[in-house]
Image (tube, coloured by chain):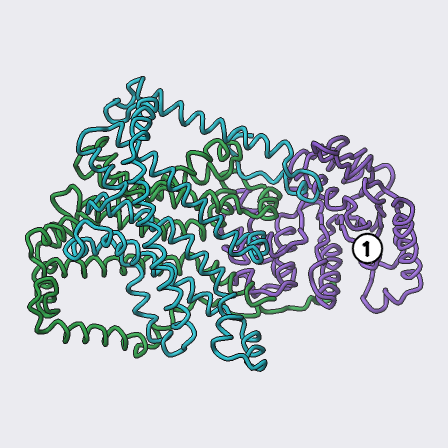
Chain colours: A cyan, B purple, C green
Amino acid sequence: MTVAVPHSAGTRAARVPARPGGTGARADRLRGALGALGLALAFETVPRTGLVPAEHLPPLSTVLAALAGRAGDAALWRTVGTTLGGWALGLLLAVVAAVVAGLVIGSVGVLRTATASTIDFLRPIPSVVFIPLVVLLFGADLGATLFLVGYACFWLVLIQVLYGVRDVDPVARDAARSAGLGPVAQVRHLVWPTVLPYAVTGLRLAASVALVLTVTAGLVIGSPGLGREIWLAQAGADIPGMYALILVTGILGIGVNALVRLAERRLLHWHVSVRREVTPR
Amino acid sequence: MTAAGPAHEPLLRVDGLRKVYPSAQRPVVAIDGLSFDVAAGEFVCVVGPSGGGKSTLLKVVSGLLPPTDGRVLLDGASVTGPVPGLAVVFQEYGRSLYAWKTVRDNVALPLLARRVPRAERHRRAQEALAAVGLADAGRAYPWQLSGGMQQRVAIARAIVGEPRVLLMDEPFAAVDAQTRADLEDLVRAIWRRLGITVLFITHDIDESVYLGGRVLVLSRAPATIRADLTVDLPAERDQLGTRADARFAALRAEVFRLIAAEGTVRT
Amino acid sequence: MTRPVRVTRPARLVRMPRPPRWAVRPLAALGLPALLVTVWWLASAGSTNPFYPPLRTVLDAFGRVWLSERFVLDVVPSLRRFALGLLLAVVLGVAAGLLIGSSRVLRTLLEPALAFFRALPSPVLVPVLLVVVGVGDAMKVAVIAFGCLWPVLLNTVDGVRGTDEVQLDTARVAGLSRLATFRHLVLPAASPQIAAGLRQALGIGLILMVISEMVVSTDGLGHAVVRFQRSFALPEMWSGMIFLGILGFLLAKALEVVERRVLAWHHGLRRATGARP
């Protein structure tokens, strides 16, 4: 069966006990490896056949050679470290600020109503808008990265935390109140556990956005990190070097995703199994 | 109004049906050598223990699932995929209706495939809705209706294309008792009015006896036909009278005994 | 005739999704923004710091800059690139997503490539496409399209994969052709997910529009604010930032309004099922 409407042949098979890790999963893994191999092969041969000029897209082997050349240099690892540092710090600041603000705003009805329109307005403003101001304020510095990352991520997490506070079960709240729990105890034992899954969702969304803006800060403002190195390689006509750095950036992106997934599983081990199995429709 | 004469070819013939789900570890035999005939105009209920391959049977008969062995014949022609002559009502009404279409457009879905002009589609969908008592609901969306009403919509969609055979897969398993009684009477009413043939799958013994002119009792998986009972109750049935009838009680006890025996025979 | 069948009416009338709460309560909605603008106005009124010009000066600049031919020179090219890029991404992303989502073979084959492009921060495309496509308009459109493609594509794939099996069986029993099944089932069923992808794409597209214009361009909004900053025309720069902010807000709102209309069924369904235990 090639390209077709999603087949329903497996419908009943779901009721049949056996299948996990069966022939299907093995074939999937095999095809995944095949796909990766094909991608690498295309990357190598397309420039060689001249379909795309090699000066625009050098073959994979050339890019890997450039990568190997840089991998021996401590500068590359410092750059990766700087990028990760900017990413992590900006994300951390945003998450802490957003969780605190979200818990306060979400718990106080008046604040919630009063801030709704302002949040609704500020949230969709792309943080790159502030680049000219940030350049004036911070120059090409870590501060610039932190501002861009922080602004964008703050709203993402804040919105999720607000959803979470709203989702607190009113019955559970009444129960907590009648059990004599004070406001702080309520936040700790009732609100926070409800909010946590939402906050983690916000974290997951913010993590990739944070990387986008860390790289952007380097590319556009020239603050230290992979973005700046990519830009310098391009400006210096070191095209294989540019692709090597982009490859590193992509791998970093995959790593960041994996890291966040891991954090998610750790933080929500009590919750995740319930939440994940019910696929949202 | 029950079985046609022996000289006639049956409308629906299930012949030596076998269905095996392949699996690396241990293939699962859901149905094994199952045969039965249904004459035109019959109302046949299939009842069997839960997890006994009833739904598999319906999927194979409707052409949604290819059999491993054996065949299904509709009017002498082999069923190898869904055909217009066979309409299906699924158990999961909430999932089988399309939430983005109005009730009327949901009902008209089978006509869409047959390139029926728009005005005609609407007219026939409206007729089918009226037949299930939902003449007013055409412009609503399915999710605005109660569960029982949603299942009526699914029934309207099944009959809109004037199928020869109506296949129903535990259609009332998910609704409350009162709604269920209403829907049972609705199905019988439609059956008598349209002269359609119904194959009704259920795990509810009372329901099978109350609805059917014939009850096929399935064995445990792998499913085979364990018994083929004729329900000699009058055609005019009602929830109170029929269920209080001594003959109804006897038939119900008979089916119950057969199914209970299944439970103890193979464990 | 048979027994009369009980006629029941729909439980509720068709309910459209409600507008957000603040829209119906103007006082609550306008209170804080009015306060913030007033504070900004008063705090900056006597400002001599060139970085923070008085709001009054900024608003003067706003009128002067954006309600003039600048609109045609900078805003129109930006919006054209953005619209074109987004349109390309949506058309390609939805088409490819439908294909990839419906074929397990294709999906598993492309999995590594999709994982890489999902994780790759799309601004790195600016230098790449600068090399491949050049400095012109095509580069910016390509950057926006390429960056917006992945959220749309990946969400479409997820949406298609989530198509309900009973609904698929229903389509088969109804005799719908493959094409009709796509049109009447797969595409609408995936549309809430596609809309989610579109929302992400809108944010990414706007970022890419601004930065591609900041980096290499002779016109456009991104270029304009950087030009003002470099020539130290700070009130104008502030006005440009405000303009971009308003644009971001309006685009997000426009998408929200369209989604509310097109996916009214989805929101209704969610409320209906959410209300049920």
Residue A89 in the image, given as x and y percentages of width and height: 33, 54
> Quick check: B65 left or right of C10?
right
Q: Nearer the viewer, residue A64 or A79?
A: A79
Badge 1 amino acid: Ser
Residue A279 in the image, given as x and y percentages of width and height: 55, 52
Question: In the figure, A139 relative to C146: above or below?
Answer: below
Residue beneath label 1, please?
B208
Say which residue appears at 85% left-offset and 44% top-offset. Answer: B219
Residue C208 in the image, given as x and y percentages of width and height: 26, 46
Residue A123 sits in quarter: bottom left
Residue A215 in the image, given as x and y percentages of width and height: 28, 44
Residue A202 sits in quarter: bottom left
Q: Nearer the viewer, residue B64 or B221?
A: B221
Say which residue appears at 19% left-offset and 29% top-offset. Answer: A237
Say which residue appears at 88% left-offset and 51% top-offset. Answer: B259
> Quick check: B204 left or right of A155?
right
Mark 1, secondary structure of its residue: helix
Q: Quadrant of the N terminus of chain A?
A: top right
> Quick check: C33 left or right of A2?
left
In the picture as drawn, the residue positioned furthest to the top comes out as: A49
Tell me which chain the residue with mark 1 is part of.
B
Question: In the figure, A212 relative to B188: above or below?
Answer: above
> Quick check: B107 left or right of B17?
left
Question: In the figure, A67 relative to C23: above or below?
Answer: above
Residue C5 sits in quarter: bottom right
